[in-house]
Amino acid sequence: MVKNKSGQVKVQQMAFMILGLTIFFVLVGLFALSFMFSGVKESKALLDKQQATLLVQKLANSPEFSCGGAFGTEKTNCVDLDKVWALKSKINDYSGFWDIKGIEILKIYPSSTGECSSSNFPNCEHLTILNSGALGVDKSTFVSLCRKESDGSRIFDKCEVGKLIVRFSNELK
Amino acid sequence: MNKLNKMNKKAQSEMVGFGIIVIIIAVLILVFISFSLNTNSNNQPQSYESEAFVQSYLQFTPICEKNNRHITNLELIKYCKNSDTCDDGKSACTALNETTIGILESSWKTGTDYPVKGYEFSIISQGTNLLKLSKGNKTSESRGSSQVFSEGLQIDFTSYY
């Protein structure tokens, strides 16, 4: 009878121990998981931003915008301003070609002011290539704005720092 | 009764021992988790924006002509490395410094009112610092780009958010 009772006590102790252990490990696991997933939202926001930057870069490197071999070796994220200026006058032919609401170029350095027009180009800050007037989300990337410049006696390549801003219809998924 | 007491005591000491082992294992797991999370946070995320900035910076045409020819920032860096001068007599390193400050100040607005709190920019050539510029505060969240070129040239840019 005594032996039976002590056996029962041991079984009971073991059951409690196993239960306690299980609860403990579940809690530790939950703690670890909450730690691991705490940065998921931030990672998603960062990935969304990077995806948007890549999409804008894709446009910058498309044949309609890219410098190609016009300025020496082929360059990435290089926009041919002369080409873009010509594209601006023909932009109606491109309606629906890109599924975007707007394309703008902003010259960052050296600083200049004003919207680009035939009277002040290329000494201007802001060049609107496409503006559908629709609302959307603006995404941008740094680009080189290259063009052929003349100093009177010779023609040389001039590249400046700018941003290509693209307006998408909706937030990227 | 005495025998039952002895057995109970033995079971209690076993439980205490087992509990100690569980606590040690749990502490080890926590140390491992915190260590792995710390190593992850040290990895600076790659930033396409910073990469694009460095590329456009290198392609920029500075106000420095060499042999009656307009050069790029990348060429200017190489002239600075060789302690060369521009055609107008200005030191290539001075021209590089002025151009870099101008581009950085115009491109990256920093401060509490801006998303970017600070940045660091450096040009390293064969292990020696040609140029190192920084502005604003360093925070725990950073994104950057490190690009390596021929002749041991390395350009690093990190922005802090």
Image (cartoon, coloured by chain):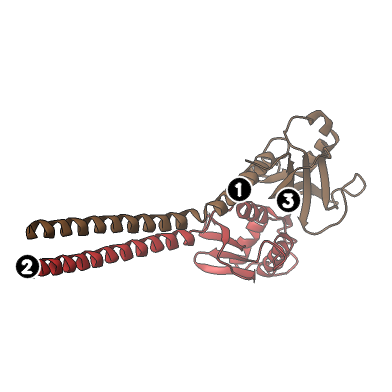
Chain colours: A brown, B red
Residue pointed to by mark 3: A163
Relative depth, front residue between A118 and A135: A135
Which three-letter amino acid code belongs to the residue tagged 1? Gln
- In the rendered structure, the answer to whether residue A163 lies left or right of residue A11 reads right
Relative depth, front residue between A80 and B89: A80
- In the rendered structure, the answer to whether residue B70 lies left or right of residue B14 reads right
Is residue B77 in view? yes
Q: Residue at x 90, y 50 (%)?
A: A120
Residue pointed to by mark 2: B3
Q: Mark 2 and mark 3, same subunit?
A: no
Q: Quadrant of residue A129?
A: top right
The residues tagged by marks 2 and 3 sit, at their Cα atoms, a distance apart of 86 Å
- In the rendered structure, the answer to whether residue A70 lies left or right of residue A49 reads right
Residue pointed to by mark 1: A50
Which three-letter amino acid code belongs to the residue tagged 3? Lys
Q: Report crowding for label 2: few under 14, some 14 to 19, many 20 or more residues within 10 A (C-alpha).
A: few
Q: Quadrant of residue B22?
A: bottom left
Tell me the subunit letter for badge 3: A
The image shows residue B55 at horizontal and vertical percentages of 63, 52
In the rendered image of this protein, does residue A56 appear above or below residue A26?
above
Q: Residue at x 80, y 59 (%)?
A: A111
Q: Nearer the viewer, mark 2 or mark 3?
A: 2
Callout 3 secondary element: strand
